Amino acid sequence: MTSACPTSRWYRLREHAEQRRLWASAARFRVAACGRRSGKSELAKRQGVARAIAPQVYADARYIFGGPTWEQSKRVFWSDLKKLVPPWALIGQTPKTAISEGELSIKLMSGATIQVVGLDRPQRAEGTPIDWLCIDEAADVREDAWTFHLRPGLSERGGEAWIISTPEGRNWLWALAQKAQEDDTGLWSFHTWASSTVLPPEEIAIARTELDERTFKQEYEADFLDASGRVYYAFDRDVHVEPVAYDPALPVSLCLDFNVSPGTGIVVQEQMYRGKNPAVDRAKPVTCVIAEIWIKDNSNTVRICQEFLARYGDHKFEVCLYGDAAGGNRGTSGVLGSDWSLVQQCLEPAFGRTAIQPSRLRMRVPRSNPSVRSRINATNSRLRAVDGTVRLIVDPSCKHLIEDLEGVTWAPNGRDIDKRNPWATHLTDGLSYMIVEEHPVGEHRSSITQL
């Protein structure tokens, strides 16, 4: 596990018996449901590289590493794979000849090709047969990517797959885990371990102070929790609702989830807590929802921005914008350009660059949306950590947001938010986009860009 390919990147791991069992398994399909930062992706990288540089049965063997999106796959795999492959294994023995940065592929002397793909478009992995496959964060990959695009590619040559993830409710990964545990043919194997088997105790202790109990069990103890019921289960209006005032001396954030009926926005500030609730964190700024914008019918992006300007147009400090990266796919975009372009056009006259000061408008919008799980876990953890600490307060004037926090539920598949109520989810979605970027949990990494 640590010396098959002697490059400096093959450092010694803090491995344990279950990891060694995963590495040595003879099963074609290995399912691993493990805690965060516990080594599952690292083992997959090493096994894939070790096998790819070895002599091949087929001259055009393909070794595929995939994650939920192209950006996530590149971030998790690409740099490490290039460092794990020794120079002697590259075709031509030179990176210039062997490595394609555009295609995220590495051609090897063995005849094999290592390729990194995003499984939001699983067609990228189709074509010639797949000899070995890693699906990372499988819980965030759509089931049909495996069923219709990847599994058929493994059939022609008896290709193998590692399907690895932190659990996320009773979804298709859970079903595969059950199948692997019940299998007595040797075709499947199942592996699981908690983060505490690898991470130092102090890291686990920190996680307990930052995450809500359910998220901690799922992310660090690899527990397949039933995801049915309330999405924001950590919210309690008796705990989280109390008056919080706008502070003109602090930055203000506008959180958007573009919609027409209703049109919505959430206004947030990070403030030091001055109330009396002993559960609220007093050591660091708390996320305070100071206002909501709710236009019931025939709204649009411009009207939301105008309402924000009517309330906060004289704000003298930064105005940060968060929300749906897909702004422009619906709403008013078909007439005047993307929703984010409209937001910028509306707000720049008030907060943009002038002759005497730089722009105070900050577009904190990711290049692609984070997963639903990342948003929900971050929001619930902000609401209440395992140790009971509260870091999110909502002003009682935000009645529609409070209704959302109490009433939004999971869809029957346990993976998506139930969107059947046209009045619900927009405010909580907007808030969660902000929280996941500023207060992420697990392995979410911001991909903020300036528009």
Image (spheres, grey):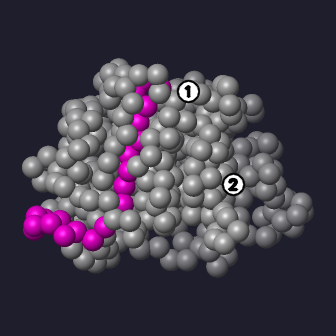
Q: Quadrant of residue 233?
A: top left
Instruction: Give the x, y percent position of residue 126.
Output: 70, 32
Instruction: Give the x, y percent position of residue 181.
Output: 31, 39
Identity, as a three-letter code, of the amino acid under mark 2: Ala
Residue at 50 percent of width and 34 percent of height: 303
How many marks the image carries: the answer is: 2
Residue at 10 percent of width and 64 percent of height: 277
Q: Quadrant of residue 4?
A: bottom right
Q: Nearer the viewer, residue 447 or 300?
A: 300
Q: Is residue 270 magenta?
A: yes
Q: Is residue 7 magenta?
A: no
Residue at image mark 2: 52
- Residue 168 is at least partly visible in this image: no
Answer with left or right where residue 439 lies relative to residue 229. Answer: right
Q: Residues within 10 Å of mark 1 (few under 14, many from 20)?
A: some
- Above or below residue 102? Residue 187 is above
- Above or below residue 440? Residue 396 is above
Q: Nearer the viewer, residue 344 or 148?
A: 344
What numbered label is drawn on residue 331? Answer: 1
Answer with left or right where residue 113 lies relative to residue 80. Answer: right
Identity, as a three-letter code, of the amino acid under mark 1: Gly
Residue at 38 percent of width and 65 percent of height: 248
Give the residues in magenta.
Answer: 260-281
Q: Distance from label 1 to label 2 (Cα)? A: 48 Å
Earlier residue among tags 1 and 2? 2
Q: Nearer the viewer, residue 348 or 265?
A: 348
Residue at 43 percent of width and 31 percent of height: 263
Q: Secondary structure at mark 2?
A: helix
- Residue 395 is at least partly visible in this image: yes
Answer with left or right where residue 38 lies relative to residue 277. Answer: right
Instruction: Give the x, y percent position of residue 93.
Output: 86, 67
